Image (tube, grey):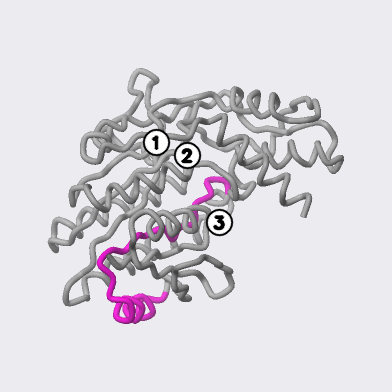
Amino acid sequence: MKVLVIGAAGFVGPYLIRHLTADMGATVFATKLPQETLDVPNAAVLDLDILQPDAIAATLAQVQPDWVVHLAAQSSVALSWKKPNLTVAINVQGTVNVLEALRGQAQPPKLLMIGSGEEYGIHPESAYPIAEAAALHPCNLYAATKACAEQIALIYAKAYGMHIVSVRAFNHIGPGQTPQFVVSDFCKQAVEIECGLHEPVIRTGNLSSKRDFTDVRDVVRAYGALMECGTSGMVYNVGSGHAIAIEQVLQMIQAQCRVPFTVEPDPARIRPVDAPMICADITALQRDTGWMPEISLAQTLTDTLDAWRAQYQS
């Protein structure tokens, strides 16, 4: 199997490439933006900007993949509020460019389309864990663009007979994630406190929100399983199936931190709109693939803290 991973220089890309090559025996080509760096073994790395349609077509002609995994996105909720035009351009127009390039191939490759659990937006707690048939009520710009891109992809699958499997991935975390995301941010601040680089205070946004956190290494196993067993035209939630308050996650980090710290709210970290709860119903994923998460949240936090410790010690 030959796989083209578009947008592989982000957090998920290297983990997915490792899983595809080491565990699934795939031949992998991975794309990045020209200004990005991507150093992965056993994969050919190519430059690609999905805002350039001709470049996508040329890459497909060069690689001739069996599968394309579309990871390229502006994936920060916080940044989507600050740069809405960029978020729309990459997440919506970029996705249309990818779909059109695929449709233009004599034999279009299969597509794994990566969306987000943020697409569901705000629902009453009684609706959780939330299934794929639930209405989408995105409450931030990132979520709105991902919902739009997903719906466009589903239309392409139906209208043109393209093989497209869609994912709504819930919060995934792990070593190497940037501090734009809450768990990595907390772990980074905790390690800076350990190293004496930061006063013993962690500043936070809304701690009452509940989120469904899954280790990125489990998430990429789910992606591989859906490539093997997912049904075209279907949408699959990928998550742990359990929600935990961000405050509890911070307490788990506090228990593992080697130096005591206190917690202070930071108004600058409060989002304009924030869903109080997000939690996945993963029945469809488990039914069609047999996938189960294997790595505990405590282990993920240990590994993420250790990754930051290694970075500060190097």
Query: Which of the two discs, 3 and 2, sits closer to the camera?
Result: 2
Q: According to the image, label 3 marks what residue?
A: 83
Q: Please tell me which residue lies in front, 214 or 199.
A: 214
Q: Is residue 188 left or right of residue 132?
A: right
Residue 308 lies in the magenta-colored region? no
Work out whether mark 1 precedes mark 2 in sequence or the reverse, and give the earlier one.
Answer: 2
Per the rendered image, the range of residues in magenta is 52-78
Other residues around mark 3 within 10 Å, as few (<14) / some (14–19) / many (≥20):
some
Kindly identify which residue carries mark 1: 239
Residue that numbered label 2 is attached to: 171
Q: Where is residue 27 in the image (x, y as percent from the top left)?
A: 35, 68
Which residue is at a point 50% across and 24% down the rendered structure image? 244
Task: Specify the quadrant of the image occupied by residue 25.
Answer: bottom left
Dot 2 amino acid type: Asn
The amino acid type of the residue labelled 3 equals Lys
Q: What residue type is labelled 1?
A: Gly
Q: Along the polypeptide, which appears first: circle 1 or circle 3?
A: 3
Point out the frontmost of discs 1 and 3.
Answer: 1
Give the alpha-carbon distance from disc 1 to disc 3, as whole Å. Answer: 27 Å
Residue 118 horizontal/vertical position (percent): 42, 40
Q: Please give the label number shown on residue 220.
A: none
Q: Is residue 302 left or right of residue 53?
A: right
Q: What's the CA distance linking mark 1 and mark 2?
A: 7 Å
> In percent of the image, x 24 and y 35: which residue is there?
284
Residue at image location 33% in from the left, 77% down from the top:
63
Q: Which of 45 and 123 is in front in this view?
A: 45
